[in-house]
């Protein structure tokens, strides 16, 4: 059943060549009928049921064919009434139904995963993005304190070293990543041991 239909561009289709083969019809006649259906409908809705393309035979020669959806298939085989043809109709309809359900389930799963990733991304963005106002306030506050300690000649106290390390860390994060998080500031300013490069 899986080989009776295929998925192309997220649509379940069967080729006119395959219909001709399975129903023991001349492919040229199938092509003729499809073109007549399209012309009779004035290129209306049923035009979307058929997609004209090509295939290559064993000798690498190129021939026209149509890819056909479930509605188009039903129209093309409507007049095939032998016992064997009816069996093939049933098999194809079942194959279309099964593949469409599989495709629908797959698409639903992909949509669910995308929604989940989007939700996580939005959540992470809220949690880690530092608003400009908070960052500028925190950085300026520490910069001011650091400058005051330098003026007092107190540049090598533990507090000055912490501020110096923090300043270097913040500048590195902003230059490298374009932002710094509240969590990073909190973790860094609460470390008991500081490792930094100046």
Image: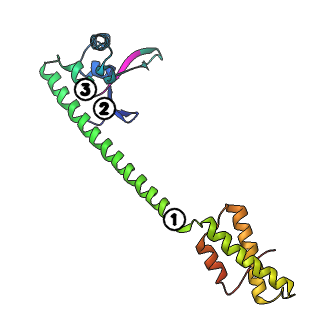
Magenta span: predominant SS is strand
Q: Which residue is mark 2?
A: 5
**Helix or strand or loop: what does disc 3 sit on?**
helix
Label 3 to label 2: alpha-carbon separation? 13 Å
Q: Which residue is mark 1?
A: 126
Query: Can you tell which of label 1 and label 2 is closer to the viewer?
Result: 1
Which numbered tag is attached to residue 71?
Answer: 3
**Helix or strand or loop: what does disc 2 sit on?**
loop
Label 3–label 2 contact, CB within 8 A: no
Label 1–label 3 contact, CB within 8 A: no
Q: Is residue 104 above or below residue 157?
A: above
The residue lying at 33 percent from left, 23 percent from top is: 48
Q: Which residues are magenta?
A: 64-69
Badge 3 density bin: few <14, some 14–19, many ≥20, Cα 10 Å: some
Q: Where the C terminus falls, by quadrant?
A: bottom right
The x, y position of residue 11, in whole percent, is: 35, 33
Badge 2 density bin: few <14, some 14–19, many ≥20, Cα 10 Å: many
Query: Can you tell which of label 1 and label 3 is closer to the viewer?
Result: 1
Q: Is residue 86 above or below residue 110?
A: above
Label 1 to label 3: alpha-carbon separation? 48 Å
Residue 72: quarter of image: top left
Query: Can you tell which of label 3 and label 2 is closer to the viewer?
Result: 3
The residue lying at 70 percent from left, 85 percent from top is: 193
């Amino acid at each position: 059943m899986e080989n009776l239909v295929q998925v192309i561009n997220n649509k379940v289709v069967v080729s006119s060549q395959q219909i001709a083969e399975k129903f023991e019809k001349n492919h040229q006649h199938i092509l003729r009928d499809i073109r007549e259906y399209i012309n009779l409908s004035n290129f209306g809705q049923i035009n979307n049921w058929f997609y004209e393309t090509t295939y290559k035979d064993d000798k690498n020669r190129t021939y026209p064919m149509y890819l056909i959806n479930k509605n188009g298939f039903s129209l093309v085989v409507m007049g095939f009434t032998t016992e064997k043809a009816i069996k093939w109709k049933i098999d194809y309809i079942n194959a279309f139904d099964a593949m469409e359900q599989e495709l629908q389930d797959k698409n639903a799963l992909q949509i669910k995963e995308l929604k989940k990733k989007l939700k996580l991304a939005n959540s992470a963005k809220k949690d880690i993005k530092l608003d400009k106002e908070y960052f500028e306030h925190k950085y300026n506050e520490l910069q001011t304190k650091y400058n005051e300690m330098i003026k007092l000649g107190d540049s090598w106290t533990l507090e000055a070293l912490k501020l110096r390390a923090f300043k270097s860390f913040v500048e590195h994060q902003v230059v490298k990543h374009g932002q710094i998080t509240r969590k990073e500031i909190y973790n860094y300013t609460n470390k008991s041991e500081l490792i930094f490069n100046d």
